[in-house]
Image: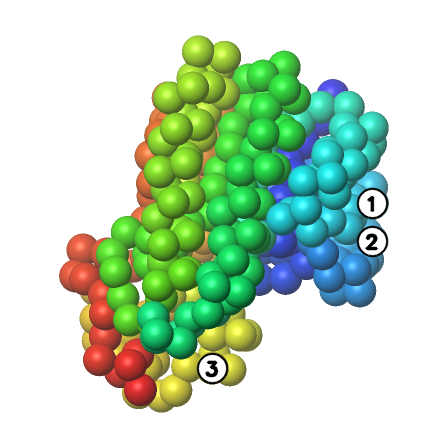
Amino acid sequence: MTTTALVTGAARGIGLATTRRFLAAGWRVAMIDRDDDALAAAAADLADKYRDGARPFVCDVSDPDAVTTMMEAVNGWAGRLDALVNNAGVADFGPIEQTSFARWRTVMATNLDGVFLCSQAAIPHLKDTGGAIVNIASISGLRASTLRTAYGTSKAAVIHLTQQQAAELGEFGVRANCVAPGPVRTKLAMAVHTQDIIDAYHEAIPLNRYGSEDEIAAAILFLASPEASYVTGQCLAADGGFESTGVGLPALRK
């Protein structure tokens, strides 16, 4: 049977780029997102080239019952699961004093609870295939930065959760790793980053540029594939060297 990946947050950005990478490598992909319209449009765009290679499943990954139903539907379609990519996430930046508990919980519900719930639901299927989990964290989970109390904390927790998964699941042949993207040139980022922020990032990143969605997707596919068969419990910072030089740019406080 064809190997199958499940990618959350697949309607756009890194999730969609990752879906394309898997499809190009001959995998089938269960595309998961809570945005029904965007997900349907993304899947339709892929249909002509990849036929039934990608199948959309609408699901809010922060809802335990919805995750259970979604995983059953994916298994019914694919019959197996070889990789889970926990990419779905929300970004809500603001000062600590202005981060209400409701905002905190909204970030945690998707960024952390979603990773936990989807992983837990996928584990029985991954044990059957000796599959892999790839969680998407952030450079903000490795180093503190401004305005990222909820977001950075959620991503730091994802990194530790990845290590827990690796420690517990290794004996079953299931690997768990994490990708921590640095600044990525997404449509959303370019819409909200001022020129001062862009210039500051370019100056601070050793490669002097933002990453692309496809570059992050390449790292995800590697960790999910047999090419990384002896790699587990690791966090790969796909960040142009940004983590090595620190974060917390003054321009981001403005």
- Residue 18 % position (x, y): 57, 49
- Residue 72 % position (x, y): 78, 30
Q: Is residue 39 visible?
A: yes
Q: Is residue 170 left or right of residue 84?
A: left
- Residues marked 2 and 1 touching at CB (< 8 Å): yes
Earlier residue among tags 2 and 3: 2
Whether residue 41 is situated above or below residue 177 in the rendered picture: below
Packing grade of label 1 (10 A; few <14, some 14-19, many >=20) is: few
Measuring 41% from the left and 35% from the top, which residue is drawn there? 162
Q: CA distance from mark 3 to mark 1?
A: 35 Å
Q: Is residue 50 visible?
A: no
- Residues marked 3 and 1 touching at CB (< 8 Å): no
Task: Say which amino acid is labelled 1.
Answer: Arg
Packing grade of label 3 (10 A; few <14, some 14-19, many >=20) is: few
Measuring 49% from the left and 38% from the top, which residue is drawn there? 134
State the image quarter where residue 150 is shown: bottom left
Earlier residue among tags 3 and 1: 1
The tag on residue 48 is: 2
Measuring 51% from the left and 82% from the top, which residue is drawn there? 191
Q: Which residue is mark 1?
A: 51
Whether residue 196 is situated above or below residue 45 in the rendered picture: below
Kind of element beneath mark 3:
helix
Q: CA distance from mark 2 to mark 1?
A: 6 Å
The tag on residue 192 is: 3
Q: Nearer the viewer, mark 2 or mark 3?
A: 3
Whether residue 194 is situated above or below residue 154 in the rendered picture: below
- Residues marked 2 and 3 touching at CB (< 8 Å): no
Measuring 79% from the left and 60% from the top, which residue is drawn there? 36
Residue at the far top: name it: 171
Task: Say which amino acid is labelled 2.
Answer: Asp
